[in-house]
Image: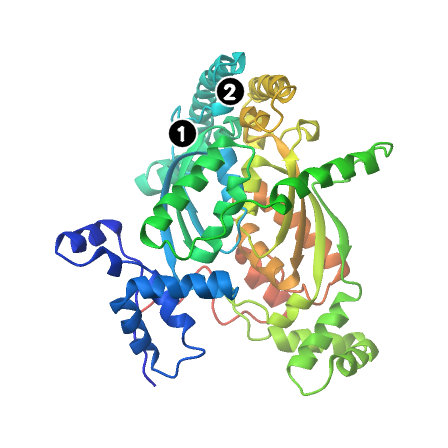
Amino acid sequence: MKVILAGYNIDSQVIEEAEAAGISKEKLTPEVLSAAYARISRNPAPVNELRQAALNEVSKARKSNRKIIFGMGHHSVAEHAVFNFDILGLSRLAIEELEHFRLCSFTEKSQRYITLENDYVMPVELADTPFAGKLEKLIEKQAAVYGTLHAELFKRLEEKHPDLVAKKSSRNMVDGWAKEDARYATLLCTSGQLGFTANARNLELIVKRLNGSKLTELRKLANHFYSRGTAVAPSILLFTTPSPYDNETPVELQNLAADALRDIPETATAGDAVLVNFTTNGDRVTAAAILCAASDRSFDSCKSVADSMTEPQLKQVFETAFSKMEFFDTPPREFEHVHFTFDVSISAASFGQLKRHRMMSQSSQRYNPSLGITVPPAVREAGMEKMFVAHAEDAEKLYTEIKSQLPDIAPYALTNAHRKRVLVTTNLRDLYHFCRLREDAHAQWDIRILASLMRKEAEKVMPMASMLLCGKDFFVERFEKVFNRKPTIDPANPPKIE
């Protein structure tokens, strides 16, 4: 076996230094990797030699890329070229749209841990309209409300946890608790920053979709991605113009939905996470998948056996699968063959975390003030709910005014407390990951409540397959309840790395 490090992402300043040292700019492109790897399937030469050939003839490699991607339709070769972007000054609303794309990596400035300044994005669409001044006034009020909430919440936490506040490290943690609740008052036009990584194939899709956005801010972002990407890799960002399918189909579906639902009364949602669909007999389906993967028998045969199992026999399948599990282990892939669909009503603050679970299927509606707002319990306990609600109502009033003329721009005026509806479909394996992370004691309270609701619904319909479904902090207790013994590794005291 021979393993060669073919390349890796490096800082752009290093590339500039290489150019200054006399290395040809053409050689400093990720395109050569795409071109070389594209030839693997039809050229018997060693892959490292194919890379060298592409590196020596970059213009030829670019022609090859265009032919393979555009002419033959083999878009996967573009995945070997990877881009990193620093993104600053993007609104919270626009960040949501960017992070909708699942096969990318995002690390975002957290509104939970960083004190927010009066930074915001004024939508270009509001320029030269009376709404611009009104939004600026609302932003000024937001700064005052945020500052008051942060100061009062931290003061109360300081009194409640004097031992934690006495230490610098834990003081910052307590301050973070205050910030995470104060941020519910901030607007969706608040600006943020993030590090973003995508391969060229996904970047091409993102540019194409953002070019069709109704928000000027997102179209500008698409232009930045395209101009910077094509400057170093012009042969692999090709399909970037939105098609009628991208631009017209969503509008046609909205019109169709409006007609179909016009005379149908709204059905009140029974809770913040309602299980609306799931795999029936999910425990037995999962058990059958486990038997199928562990044998050479067909799924039908395994399903027949699983369906005929007694409760103790069925339980034994899951106990065997789980008996050596530790808090960091994921269930086997066989747990991906059963699913749950939840109708979720969630705050913008909580959605900012939910959207990061990109292996879930999430169909997100627009923000809807009729769903109400999420008031942090700490704000209510501190007697500041009236001020908080009044600010949210001011935001909603401006939202309604803007919506009458510019419906796509109106959400910039809403707060992190405002809610939207999201249809979430997840398989059981990914639900384990979600609950392990988001129901843990260290998780933010809003997303923790959502994870708990989803877990409880899953346990009702698949009690055996979900026997260890819980937050990381509760894993030892759940494991001990099932097996009458503790797991080998305690999450509170992980083994030291030598």
Whether residue 92 can be seen here: yes
Q: In this view of the protein, which residue sits in the foreground, 164 or 4?
A: 4
Q: Is residue 368 left or right of residue 327?
A: right
Which residue lies at the image location 48% right of the left edge and 16% below the top edge?
141
Q: Which amino acid, by three-letter code, is at mark 2?
A: Leu
Of badges 2 and 1, the one in the foreground is 2
Q: CA distance from mark 2 to mark 1?
A: 23 Å
The residue that label 2 is drawn on is: 126
Disc on res. 474 = none
Q: Earlier in the sequence, mark 2 or mark 1?
A: 1
Q: Residue at x 56, y 59 (%)?
A: 433
Q: Amino acid at mark 1?
A: Leu
Instruction: Give the percent coordinates (x, y) of residue 225.
Output: 40, 45
As drawn, 35 above or below 278: below
In the displayed image of the protein, which residue is found farthest to the left?
21
Image quarter (top left, top right, bottom left or bottom right) of the N terminus: bottom left
Badge 1 marks a residue whose secondary structure is: loop
Q: Which residue is mark 1?
A: 116
Residue 239's spot in the image, x, y percent? 50, 52
